[in-house]
Every structure is written in C-alpha cells, then in structure tokens.
C-alpha cells in the first residue's frame, strides 16, 4: 500500500512549536524517522500555527528535503499554499487535497498535470460531505470523469471518501468499506482510494488497535493508500501483512523484513 506519513503537521504540538521557533531539527528528525519506517510520501501540513502559511509551507518543504528524498504530500485546503509547497519541492509530489466540485477540479487537475503530481480529491460538493454511500460514489464518479477529460491517468488520481471519527457516527466505518468496493467499479483501471486513517480513532482510547483493525478491513475492501502514523510499528506490520495476504507481496518466512527492505512503496 501507499503509506503517507502524517506527523509533519502543525496540528501536533511539537511541530507547531518548531514552526513558531523556526527550529528545523524536530521536523528533520520526523522526516528521517518516518522515511526509515517505510513512508511512501511525507505529508506536510502547516496546521493553524502559522501566520504566513505560504512561507511556512515553503520552509517545511525545504528543511524536510535537506534530510530525505522521500516524495512529499503537500497538504493544505488553500490553493496558494499548495502552490508554494510545489514550487519549493524538488521531485514529483502528491497534492493533498482538492474538493470534488467542478470549479475546484478545473483549477487543481491542470496544476497536477503541469507539476507531474498525483492528486487527492475529496468527495465533497457544494452541499458539503454527504453522509450516504450513493452520493459519495456519485461524486467520486464525477471526479473520475473530469480527470479523464483532462487526460489525468486514473492511477495518479486518489479519491478520499473522508473518514470520520468512530465515536461521531459508529455506522460510518462499515459504510466506508462499501464505498471503497463501489469506487473500484467506476473505471478500468479504477482510481486509487485514500483515507486519513487516524481520523477514525480521534478521541478514542486504543487508537493503535482501532487504526490497525480498520486498516486490514479497508485494504481487503480496496483501499490503496492512507495518511497514517507510520511510526506505529504494529500498524505498519499490519499494512505489510495485509498486502501479503492479498497476494500483493510474495510470501516468504521473512516477508516482514523483505517488505521493510523494499520500504512498502506500492
Ligand atoms: N484526508 C486527507 N488528508 C488528511 C486527512 C484526511 N490530512 C490531515 C488529516 N486528515 C490526516 N492527518 C492526521 C494527523 C493527525 C491526526 C489525525 C489525522 C491526529 N492528531 C492528534 C489528535 O487530534 O488527537 C493530535 C495529537 C497532538 O496534538 O499531539 O489524530 O482525512 N487526504
């Protein structure tokens, strides 16, 4: 699976503090550790700490790239902040993310094509985040159609059907599994599917257990990628083992070690 490492996010107090103090070391330590843990991408999100989000995004991208070549996921709801991140980035990025309505897609898809980036699109439209399955799949289909118009390869399109905390609505996670299955039927090849895994366990005890149990179920239902805590070794082991059980990695007695050497990049 594609593991997008979540920790370089101003929502976390240590990162927020580093941003305020303009201290690159905690950011670079997280960049190194997350890369060594097998991250496919490092998510970079300025959070709410920054007064000037553009320059903080640029700084986070620069200090991260000083210590690792792991590709970056530029995470912001603001187009200008995303652009600042892409400008500073050396390699091909993941753009995280774009809302699913046509006006937004018309801005972000050409940007992804221009920057050779992959693009995360949320199943949000003018009415907001739909609660039911059908509407989420319908928005996903309209995103896939728009991407096809522009000639964006479906494998570079990641649909995020938006995972809510378990304790907000306990019916949602099982519905999400159904959404994953249905999104796979939209096109051939299908778009990829991504979620913010830690959203699920926010405000709960046993966060790691909740995250890894859902991850195994979600991968079986067609999930391809997650913004997740790659520093949680138990969680990463589930990611590797689920890929092996789903026949995406060949079995050997040392499959865990083999996958860690290959850094579970796909
Ligand atoms: N989809 C996509 N991108 C995303 C999300 C998503 N990016 C941001 C977020 N959601 C994924 N990243 C996180 C990062 C942290 C947490 C959850 C998701 C988290 N933080 C602790 C908390 O809230 O309890 C903060 C702990 C602290 O303050 O130190 O759980 O859905 N495409």
Image (cartoon, grey):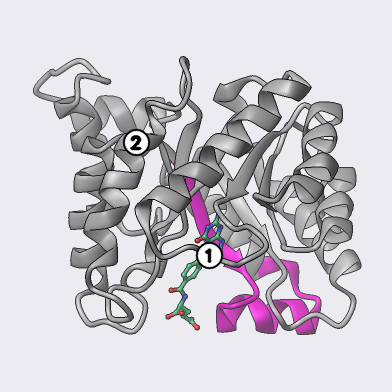
Which of the two residues, 249 or 157, is positioned nearer the viewer here? 157
The residue at which mark 2 appears reads as 182
> In the rendered structure, which segment of residues is drawn in magenta?
3-25
Residue 226 visible in image: no
Which of the two residues, 41 or 149, is positioned nearer the viewer here? 149
State the residue at coordinates (53%, 65%).
129
Q: Residues within 10 Å of mark 2 (few under 14, many from 20)?
A: some
Distance from disc 1 to disc 2, alpha carbons, whole Å, reads 18 Å
State the residue at coordinates (51%, 38%).
40
Mark number, residue 46: none
Q: Could you say which quadrant of the image residue 248 lies in?
A: top left
Of the 4 image quadrants, the one containing the C terminus is top left
Is 47 one of the magenta-colored residues?
no
SS assignment at label 1: loop
Describe residue 152's horizontal placement relative to residue 82 as left or right: left
Query: Upstream in the sequence, badge 1 or badge 2?
Result: 1
Q: As displayed, is residue 109 above or below residue 57?
A: above
Residue 238: x %, y % from top left: 21, 45
Describe residue 59's horizontal placement relative to residue 260 as left or right: right
Residue 230: x %, y % from top left: 40, 53
SS assignment at label 2: helix
Q: As displayed, is residue 244 above or below residue 30?
A: above
Residue 222: x %, y % from top left: 31, 34
Q: Residues within 10 Å of mark 1 (few under 14, many from 20)?
A: some
State the residue at coordinates (50%, 53%).
5
Q: Check contact, mark 1 vs mark 2: CB within 8 A.
A: no
Describe residue 23's horizontal placement relative to residue 243 as left or right: right
State the residue at coordinates (36%, 52%).
133
Residue 209 visible in image: yes
Mark number, residue 129: 1
Residue 4: x %, y % from top left: 50, 47
């Amino acid at each position: 699976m594609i593991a997008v490492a979540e920790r370089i996010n101003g929502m976390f107090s240590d990162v927020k503090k580093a941003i305020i103090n303009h201290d690159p070391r905690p950011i670079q330590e997280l960049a190194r550790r997350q890369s060594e843990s097998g991250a496919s991408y490092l998510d970079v999100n300025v959070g709410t700490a920054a007064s000037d989000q553009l320059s903080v995004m640029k700084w986070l991208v620069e200090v991260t790239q000083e210590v690792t070549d792991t590709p970056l996921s530029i995470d912001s709801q603001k187009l200008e902040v995303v652009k600042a991140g892409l400008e500073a980035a050396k390699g091909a990025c993941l753009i995280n993310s774009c809302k699913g309505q046509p006006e937004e897609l018309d801005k972000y898809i050409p940007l992804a094509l221009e920057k050779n980036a992959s693009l995360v699109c949320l199943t949000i439209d003018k009415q907001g985040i739909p609660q039911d399955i059908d509407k989420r799949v319908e928005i996903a289909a309209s995103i896939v159609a728009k991407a096809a118009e522009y000639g964006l390869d479906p494998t570079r399109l990641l649909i995020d059907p938006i995972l809510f905390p378990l304790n907000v609505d306990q019916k949602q996670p099982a519905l999400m599994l159904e959404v994953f299955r249905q999104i796979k039927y939209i096109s051939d090849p299908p778009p990829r599917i991504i979620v913010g895994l830690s959203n699920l366990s926010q405000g709960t005890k046993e966060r790691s257990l909740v995250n890894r149990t859902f991850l195994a179920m979600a991968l079986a239902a067609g999930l391809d990628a997650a913004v997740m805590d790659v520093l949680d070794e138990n969680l990463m082991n589930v990611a590797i083992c689920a890929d092996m059980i789903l026949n995406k990695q060949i079995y050997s007695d040392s499959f865990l070690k083999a996958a860690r050497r290959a850094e579970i990049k796909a």
